Image (cartoon, rainbow, N blue to C red):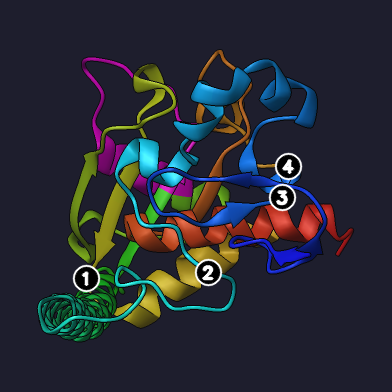
Amino acid sequence: MFKCARCNSEGLDGVLCSGCKLKFDFPCSGITKAGYNKLGGDRQLQWKCASCKTGLIPTPPGSVTASSSPTPNSLEMAHSLINDFTQKIHKLESRLDTLEKTNLETATIHNKIDHLEQKLNEKEQWSRRNNIEIKGVPLFKSENLIDTIVNLSKKINYPITPNQINFVARVPSRINNNSKPIVASFHNYHLKEEFMLAARRLKSLSSKDLGYSDDKRIFVNDHLTVSNKMLLTKVKALAKEKHF
């Protein structure tokens, strides 16, 4: 009976290594019993285990090898790697903090810009408080827009004189430049509101009523800023969608 140097199991038969002088059972030796017997006497005496062939010392079961035991150098390397990893984490956290601060500052700037744009839009709309915008009046090269406004005032039963008009002009249109809207400014807000109210009472007002051959619907509204026009368009679309 003997104990295998590798698995520590007891056995009746095995092979003896000529190098380390340890005995192994056949499963742990890497050679079968039949194969070992074919080697003959001299070659059996020279047989070496796999560890001796490779120059490695065989490790008994349950033992701790030198490679598995931490050395000072390996500990220093591990500490160095941990320190490097910790520094990288700190740098990453610092960058994340900087990014959060940048995002917060950007959001603050956007809020300030939105506030300024809102204030600017309010001031611009206030500057247009005496203005009306007329759509649907055909465009002619030799037209007299003051006469057009005076003529329109008679048709809506709210006659005015040229002296009550501050200015009147055609403005560009994104939809159709052949029928540019007319913007007219009155001397006071009350006059403008009464004119627009009278025009809205006459719901069937068209260009034919002003002596034009075309029969287009004429609309008289407030002279809105671009932002307010976009908002009005969204409100109308939403109202249509909700059947309001």
Q: Amino acid at mark 2?
A: Pro
Q: Identify the secondary structure beneath mark 1.
A: helix
Q: Is residue 4 above or below residue 150?
A: below
Disc 2: which residue = 60
Residue span colored magenta:
134-152
Q: Residue at x 34, y 54 (%)?
A: 226
Query: Distance between the Cα atoms at labels 3 and 2?
Result: 13 Å
Q: Amino acid at mark 3?
A: Asp
* Circle 1 residues within 10 Å: few <14, some 14–19, many ≥20: some
Query: Distance between the Cα atoms at labels 1 and 3?
Result: 100 Å
Disc 3: which residue = 25
- Asked whether the residues under the numbered discs 4 and 3 touch, taking CB atoms below 8 Å apart as contact, a structural biologist would say yes
Q: Nearer the viewer, mark 4 or mark 2?
A: 4
Residue 39 image label: none
Magenta span includes 113: no
Q: Is residue 52 above or below residue 1?
A: above
